[in-house]
Image (cartoon, rainbow, N blue to C red):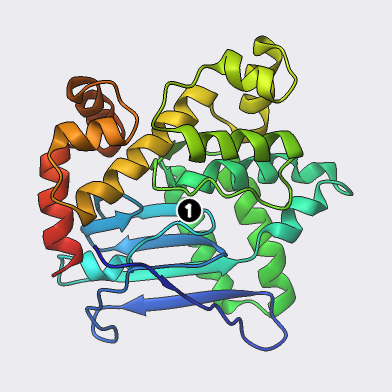
Amino acid sequence: MKKPFLQHIIPPKNTSFLVEYSKSGNIEYDNFWHFHPEYEIAYVPHGKGKRFIGHRISMYNDGDLVMLGPKIPHNTLYYGYESSDYEQYVILFDGSHISEMKTFFPEFEQVEQLLKKSSTGLYIRGKQKHELGNEIKKMFQMNTFDRLMALFTLLNKTAKNTTTSLRASSYLVATPESTFRLQKVYAIIREDFMQKITTQEVANNIGMTESSFCRFFLKNTGRSFKQALIDYRINEACTMLANTNLPIGIVAIDSGFSNASMFSKYFKKIVGERPLAYRSRFYMEINA
């Protein structure tokens, strides 16, 4: 498996974010496995193919609209396009200051929640995604200030829309906004994910009751501790499947699952295919 490249995003002069447009005929069929600290919104009005986001390989069609949080490894969408007609619009922006704005402007509450949800990638569903796509298209005709206001409006509308998590690989790296307790929880997951970890043990470690800890973690991360632990284990398993020839049973144990059957069950649920199928397809596609 190729290591993702760190992509440096440089917005045009006197602007705070980048808006790009590409279409078949003026793009290269490039296998660019990368990540960046910026949030990304990608809209494909015309085109179909495979998208590679985190450890997920899935299909997209006309009107596809996704939002990725920071540092999620992914390929350029046009690397996997399979149609003769293809075009995409991409917005890349630093969301750290937007999160801080809620302190002064409570109207940004829903936007802040959207940014948190995008940490594992979001697929925007429903007819509204086409309306959102048209809003993105209009941004190309705006001056820099109006474009910034349009970004806020786009994020607010997206926050109110129906979304589905892509469950892409997310690295449990404590951010500056993380509380001391969350940092300790993440450290426990990273260090002990191969062992059995109970919510009671973690709660005791950070000085909380089990019920208080469960509410605290869900409120601050948008998912339960159990789900965070399983996601981390699956992410570790994906790395082993892509980088080693270890038997599935060994991968299961080394990633923290008690047996291969349970591992395969969760892997299929989260990644969308069996471990062996994932290893074969990911190797062929990413290393092509």
Decide: is 272 above or below 48. above
| Location of residue 277 in the rendering, given as x and y in whole percent from the top left corner | 11, 43
Task: Indicate the quadrant where residue 258 lies.
Answer: top left
Decide: is 232 above or below 51. above
Task: Name, please, the residue furthest toward the right.
Answer: 104
User: What residue is shown at x 11% (from left), y 61% (from top)?
Assistant: 284
| Location of residue 216 in the rendering, given as x and y in whole percent from the top left corner | 69, 24
- Specify few, some or many for label 1: CA neighbours under 10 Å numbering under 14, 14-19, or 20 or more: many
Indicate the quadrant containing the C terminus: top left, top right, bottom left or bottom right.
Answer: bottom left
Q: What amino acid does circle 1 point to?
A: Met
The one nearer the camera, 225 or 191, is 191
Question: Mark 1 sits on what residue?
Answer: 67
Residue 274 shows up from this direction: no
User: What residue is shown at x 53% (from left), y 53% (from top)?
Assistant: 69
User: What residue is shown at x 46% (from left), y 27% (from top)?
Assistant: 227
| Location of residue 209 in the rendering, given as x and y in whole percent from the top left corner | 71, 12
User: What residue is shown at x 58% (from left), y 38% (from top)?
Assistant: 186
Is 155 left or right of 165, judged from the image as shown? right
Indicate the quadrant containing the N terminus: top left, top right, bottom left or bottom right.
Answer: bottom left
| Location of residue 96 in the rendering, given as x and y in whole percent from the top left corner | 70, 58
The mark tally for this picture is 1
Secondary structure state at the residue bearing disc 1: strand
Residue 154 shows up from this direction: yes
Is 195 left or right of 206, judged from the image as shown? left
